[in-house]
Image (cartoon, grey):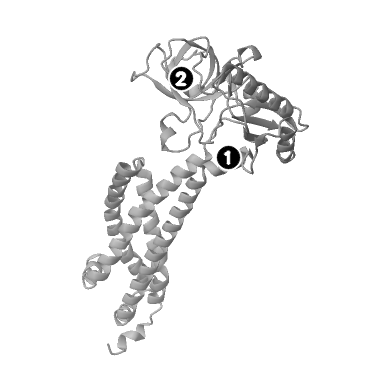
Amino acid sequence: MKLHPMIAALRKHKAGVVLIALQIALTLAIVCNAIFIIGQRIDRVNRPTGLDESNLLLVSQQWVGAPSADTPDGVAKLDAMQKEDLVALRNLPGAASVAAINSVPLLNSSWTGAASLKPDQQFSKDLTRTAYYFTDEQALSTLGLRLVAGRNFTAADVQNHGFRDQFARPVAILSQALADKLYPKGNAVGKVVYLDGSASPSTIVGVVARMQTPATGSFGNDFAWNSTLVPVRLDANFARYAVRTKPGQLDAVMRAVKPALYQVNPLRVLDDDSVKSFADIRAKAYRADVGMAILMGVICLVLLSVTAAGIVGLTSFWVGQRHRQIGVRRALGARKADILHYFQLENLLIAGSGAVIGIGMAIGLNLVLMRYYEMDRLPVFYALLGVVAVLVLGQCAVFVPARRASNVPPVTATRAA
């Protein structure tokens, strides 16, 4: 089939050809970037935290009229109250283990700092960002963290300090990502790290395979896996406890938490959001990402539908205008398949032209998003995927009117124009 007569025919319909080509180009540019955003959001939502997330819940509570954490006597009383809570929670029939902790992954409540291999490096460029988890010797078993090197904390390692106190951190457990950044050659266990520009070293006693930080926004992207566990119970007018339940006992334990804690000390606040499963924490943390993925998916669907409708409408209009010409071709020996292929190839030329323009527009749109919205560079794969998508869409959209054109009988050639 020769292209010259086809191109000559398209020149007679310049406005329609240009509009459809630009519509395809715009659709390609938006769909490529939208699918890339969807892929990124899905990757974020599905990334593992490093925890065994099943049968895990978090309790957040606040005491009423609690002692001040700014005095040694107040800190001692707060710590005694926290210990009473831990005993009560560990005695729940369905509880497997309980740990005091300041936060958990995805909670968006972070205590962040920096780690260095040299002391007194408060303003050094060599500092590595990290998020701190202040907890106790039951943290690894409660959270389901996998220890890959070294040892767990012991009860003797655990200290307690006021929430605002400055305190030494003799030992720490690091995530594998942080340990590898500090000691790229491995064997971080037994070596020291200086936390927050301190002059006092912290000995690395263990390394866990993975532990995500609490931050889920762009703030924490650069150090999402750099976690440091410190054996310290922080004493304040509020406290958090991670609870691992026995299999199948999560709901029962969640219902039993409030009565058990109120029985220990009724002067506290436990609202509807105080006891939540880790599944709920994950769902809340990624609600915006899921919403964005759904929105981008709807936008893609609408754009593709409008583009397909435009192709169908324009091709149907052209078929109506060319009825007599199609009949002449049929009378001269053209088969139904020839007429069908003609319109498919014609659409392929238009869609191909639009796709070429669309690739440039997609790259330009991606550069704008990179500059203003911290988006990553669009991989070539997504551009190629978009080209294939619009070409397939065009062929599917043109098929029905092209098939109708192929059914035009040769006798149409004898009718008056």
Residue occupying the point 62% across, 20% down: 136
Q: Nearer the viewer, residue 267 or 192?
A: 267
Q: Position of residue 328 (x, y in %)?
A: 30, 81
| 394 or 91, nearer to the observer | 91
**Which of the image's four quarters has the N terminus?**
bottom left
Question: Between tags 2 and 1, which lies in front?
Answer: 1
Among the 4 quarters of the image, the one containing residue 242:
top right
Please, is residue 187 above or below residue 271 in the view? Answer: above
Q: CA distance from mark 2 to mark 1?
A: 28 Å
> Who's the residue at 42% across and 57% down the image?
300
- The disc placed on residue 281 is 1
The kind of residue tagged 2 is: Asp
* Image-based side of 17 in relation to 344, left or right: left
Q: Label 2: which residue?
A: 180
Residue sitting at x 34%, y 69%: 343
- Which structural element holds mark 1? helix
The mark that comes first in sequence, 2 or 1, is 2
Is 117 located above or below residue 141 in the figure? above
Q: Quadrant of residue 7?
A: bottom left
SS class, disc 2: helix
Q: Residue at x 27, y 87 (%)?
A: 417
